[in-house]
Image: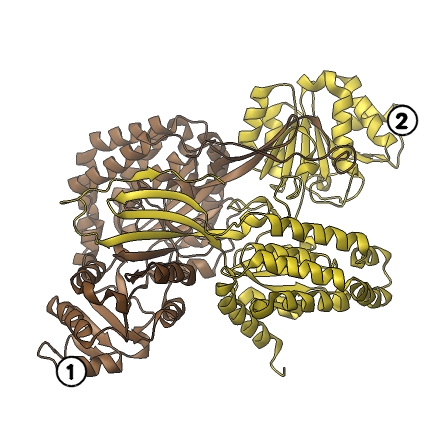
Chain colours: A brown, B yellow
Amino acid sequence: MSLPLSKQVEKAAAEARTCGRLLQQAPRSEILRHYASLLKEQAENIFAANQLDLEREDDANLKKRLKFDLPKLESVLSGIETLAAMPEVLGTVELATKLDTGLVLERVRTPIGVLAIIFEARPDALPQIAALAIKSGNAALLKGGREAGQTNALLFSLLREALGTYAPAFHLFEGREAVESMLKSKDIDLIIPRGSKELVTYIQQNTQIPVLGHADGICHIYIDDTYEQSLAQAGDIVLDAKLTYPAACNSLECLLLDKNLSTSFKLNLCRELVSNQVELRLTPSLYQLVQSQPFFQPNLCKPATPSDFGYEFGAAILAVAEVDGLEAAINHINTFGSGHTDALLSESQASFERFFQGVDSSSVYHNCSTRFADGFRYGFGAEVGISTGRMPPRGPVGVEGLLTYKYRLVGAGHITAPYGKSKQFIHEPIKVQKV
Amino acid sequence: MSLPLSKQVEKAAAEARTCGRLLQQAPRSEILRHYASLLKEQAENIFAANQLDLEREDDANLKKRLKFDLPKLESVLSGIETLAAMPEVLGTVELATKLDTGLVLERVRTPIGVLAIIFEARPDALPQIAALAIKSGNAALLKGGREAGQTNALLFSLLREALGTYAPAFHLFEGREAVESMLKSKDIDLIIPRGSKELVTYIQQNTQIPVLGHADGICHIYIDDTYEQSLAQAGDIVLDAKLTYPAACNSLECLLLDKNLSTSFKLNLCRELVSNQVELRLTPSLYQLVQSQPFFQPNLCKPATPSDFGYEFGAAILAVAEVDGLEAAINHINTFGSGHTDALLSESQASFERFFQGVDSSSVYHNCSTRFADGFRYGFGAEVGISTGRMPPRGPVGVEGLLTYKYRLVGAGHITAPYGKSKQFIHEPIKVQKV
């Protein structure tokens, strides 16, 4: 207990590595069900611990995120039960090839190893994320926020109880100093930061360990001139994308209007946004149009500044620009976007094919709201985060994204020397069950 | 032309990014065939350029790697033709789900973006790697060795000729300084170093861009006591793994013998290795056994030192240790291995299942030589490298490993607000063609 924190993290990661190797053989769905039942049993104690955390906090916004009440517990339990009911994800064969008679290659799904999951005030993240790790057979070091210290401590002790002999696969830390040690650990294979842009950027820039996540969610919708007749639908989609949860990473930050859309389309859409209390940051030609309108309100209709593009407002504020056609829109999105989610509203299938190919983002949409970008909505059951990097896993990441693979080659005394001489490889694909 | 090198790299990467976005729509197989025909036409000029490089070089080993002759050209051409003949890899749908009526999610294979490929003296790497990039629709910055300057320049100018209007997707640099700039580029998505352990380690430790590759190839074979009756096969496999190409990363560096194998098995195997001029580094009990044997030769039978384990000899030298059972072998491999390729020789299927699960490496084998770990041998047609990291792609990486994916969601005006209230997600899997 007198070990310095950096040594504690090192020791915990090594323990997680060793114990994690056994976790894939453990009855993981049973562990999940056991954890759910412990959480249910201890509900009153959890709420009481949470009360202690809440009492120390003054900030109303933080209090809201910190709160762990019955609805949150129910949502956590439903998530864990969904995961427990999902079929086994480990051991699936993704690819199989007969290299030669009696020599078969398979690519088999396996856990990644040890995850470091760094989350903020929300204590419900702890059981959700731990459950995803258990389902995928990964060990994990968790770093919670000090604000949620009492709640996290209890949620974690129930987790360790449910894990039984596999408890050393999971460890809980608090505080920024623990993060520093995690960033350097040789026994951590993937870091998943769930927090502020600053935290994610800091982690991405200060570790050689792969990082899954996103610093920014700067989502765009481009409306082309074939959508002229679908004003009502355009309005619904833009309002859904902007207003259902402005702080979410999949919310709309920038609307691109094709310059060939009619003036009335542009004005009607702006009016609808303004009447829904969305503050617009308009490029000059649009600002000029809007300025003379009856719905013009100086506090909601402002000229855009260059810094309004490529910026995550996280509030009921929207940058709006006119663009000169599809290629200009694609170019705008690739320049100012963050690789998260971008949508085209268009009646043209060909335009969408080009848009899909040209936009570099991890989710590219046609005629729907950007807010569908979410692991639950995608049908993954749960989500560990959304990755805006280029390498897989990207986009919303569920259990599957926490898996990697190993090649398995089974022979009967096969050696390589004869190939290319007396023997040739067959390379015959073997059908595998698509899951 | 008077731009400093760092600015040249930055400009080239930005050009590669922009032009690379078009490359996925290009007739990529035609470009590959065009490149192959240009290489054939210009064979004599290529050999002449290579002669100039060879004349400047004194080191015989380096000369061997530097040489670009007819057999090497033929192997390059055959690789390019194989790639050109492979079916299209982009646009494949890996996963499809009906989220709701008229709302379909697909995960579609796409290129990663811009690769930085850093290779050493071998000029044949340039056309091989460029062909893999073209097939997978990726742009690339190539960094060749100065030693191969004349050869690379010609091979690259033919590549740009074959690329035609897509030429700006590829750029060639020389020298370590170019590498420094690549490590910092915002327009490079994946770095693939093919070179010395020092180069790979340096790159891994000095960039936040994902790196695909391996610094070490420290492969193990563990023989358990059920293999007692298969001495001849064990000898063949160990010799194949050690001697067919000792400098290769998939060659055997450490042999683990179960302590319950008979003394005669152990001695016979050691004798066969010594008679094939393999230098053994033996743990004390084995050294003692061997020391009294007629085949003992002091220059080939040496006591092992701790640094012999976890070391890539890259030569006809082999560390040999006795281990106490399967778990000890797994533990040894996870401690001293490099995550490359490790094999079990055993008659027990159950032991292999445990070995496969317990060993963390990217390729885990049963009853065959470690030297099968290779993209061509796995049936991938070609190989960009072997990755020993945990995250995909790992193991031998072919065209498929140079792809990532995008989510594509197509709706008909769908918004998220009604879900969970008046609407529910269907999440109905749609069958996709397994490729």
Q: Position of residue B219 (x, y in %)?
A: 67, 38
Determine crowd level at label 1: few under 14, some 14-19, many 20+ residues with C-alpha closer than 10 A. Answer: some
Q: Position of residue B120 (x, y in %)?
A: 71, 59
Which residue corresponds to mark 2? B295
Secondary structure type for disc 1: helix
Report the label total: 2
Query: Compared with residue B406, is residue A429 higher up or lower down, i.e. above or below?
Result: above
Dividing the image into 4 quarters, which one contains the N terminus of chain B? bottom right
On screen, residue B41 versus residue B99, left or right, reads right
Mark 1, mark 2: which one is toward the viewer?
1
Residue at 50% of width from left, 46% of height from top?
Answer: B391
The amino acid type found where label 1 is placed reads Gln
On screen, residue A152 versus residue B273, left or right, reads left
Name the image quarter holding residue B308: top right
Name the image quarter holding residue B127: bottom right
Name the image quarter holding residue B354: top right
Query: Compared with residue B39, is residue B335 higher up or lower down, i.e. above or below?
Result: above
Res. A291 mark:
1
How far apart marks 1 and 2 lie (CA) works out to 97 Å
Does residue A210 appear anywhere in the picture? Answer: no
Q: Position of residue A382 (x, y in %)?
A: 31, 42
